[in-house]
Image (spheres, rainbow, N blue to C red):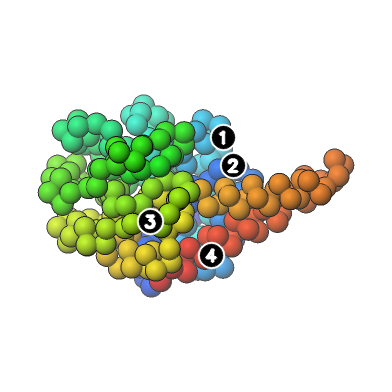
Amino acid sequence: MSLLNFNDILRIAQERQFKAIGSFNLHCIEMLPAYFRAAKKTNSPLMIQISTGTAQYLGYKLLVDSVCSLAESENVPTCLHLDHCTDINAIETAMNAGFTSVMYDGSHLSIDDNIANTRIVVEMARPKNITVEGELGAIGGSEDGKAVADEDITITTVEDAVRFVHETQVDMLAVSVGTVHGLYTGKAQIRHERLTAISKATGTPLVLHGGTGVSDEDMRLAVTEGINKVNVGTEMNVQWVGQCKTTFEKGKVNDSVRKFLIPANEAVTQVLMEKIALFK
Ligand code: 13P
């Protein structure tokens, strides 16, 4: 089975009664089978997203080959997405390697420059049937080493979102509506009204970043308000590292390292299954 783009897996997800797709950051190659296990157990299509840091660590080809191979052997409709990329050359590398979806993140730029660069990426992607995510507004917290301070958070406006979608023709739009990347210090204050208004005005699938730590109630609501893609990254890392700390501590140096990683991967499968259950 070849990899699918976001529009294709969203359609399959909706046929299976899901309102949204979870897009799960992969932190290392050892975690990969855990994602497919969760998708199979929930009968959900799978979207795996890769930060530029992970892409540099593992290499685009290894990622494409291994995700493609598991999609085929496990018979799971799968999309491989490049997360938060500010470098158009890196996006081109991912596209040529076989990624089926990409995000150009121009949220740090003026809206005019963000639109111009996102438009370039959309034009590169269309002939290859690759979907493109853009971002408007500034989401707080820290992602792949890049931090946005609280005072720099900008909530996406309806007017800007309409203009951005119209002029770029992106397939999906990441909006800043109160979530943050990474761990929360308090409860996420999601602007549900703004979310609904942006969705109605743009008619485009919206993306919720910072899915870690969002309450189940907020998540269930957000997927009825126009969110069709939910990004979750930190939560799998927290579970995996937490389990590994325990198993490595208790283990012996001549134990197969596999023994230490299996409980960590089981915890990751559990995270994905719990998130996916919220999208029905
Ligand atoms: P979290 O790490 O907060 O779940 O956010 C992930 C994300 O939005 C990646 O783009």
Tell me: residue 114, above or below residue 217. Answer: above
Tell me the amino acid under the disc marked 3.
Ala
Q: Depth-wise, is mark 1 or mark 2 nearer the camera?
A: 2
Residue on which disc 4 sits: 273
Q: Mark 3 and mark 2: span between their CA atoms?
A: 27 Å
Q: Residues within 10 Å of mark 2 (few under 14, many from 20)?
A: some
C-alpha distance separating marks 4 and 3? 21 Å
Question: Which amino acid, by three-letter code, is at mark 2?
Answer: Cys
Q: Few, some or many C-alpha atoms within 10 Å of disc 1 (few <14, some 14-19, many ≥20)?
A: some
Query: Which tag, 4 or 2, sits closer to the chain's start?
Result: 2
User: What is the quadrant of residue 198 in the picture?
Assistant: bottom left
Residue at 55%, 52% (x, y): give it.
Answer: 236
10 Å neighbourhood of mark 4: few (<14), some, or many (≥20)?
Answer: many
Residue with the mark numbered 2: 28
Residue 252 screen position, x and y as percent:
86, 44
Label 1 belongs to which residue?
A: 58
Check disc 3 and report the residue beneath it: 188
Where residue 245 appears, x then y in whole percent?
71, 46
Q: Is residue 241 above or below residue 221?
A: above
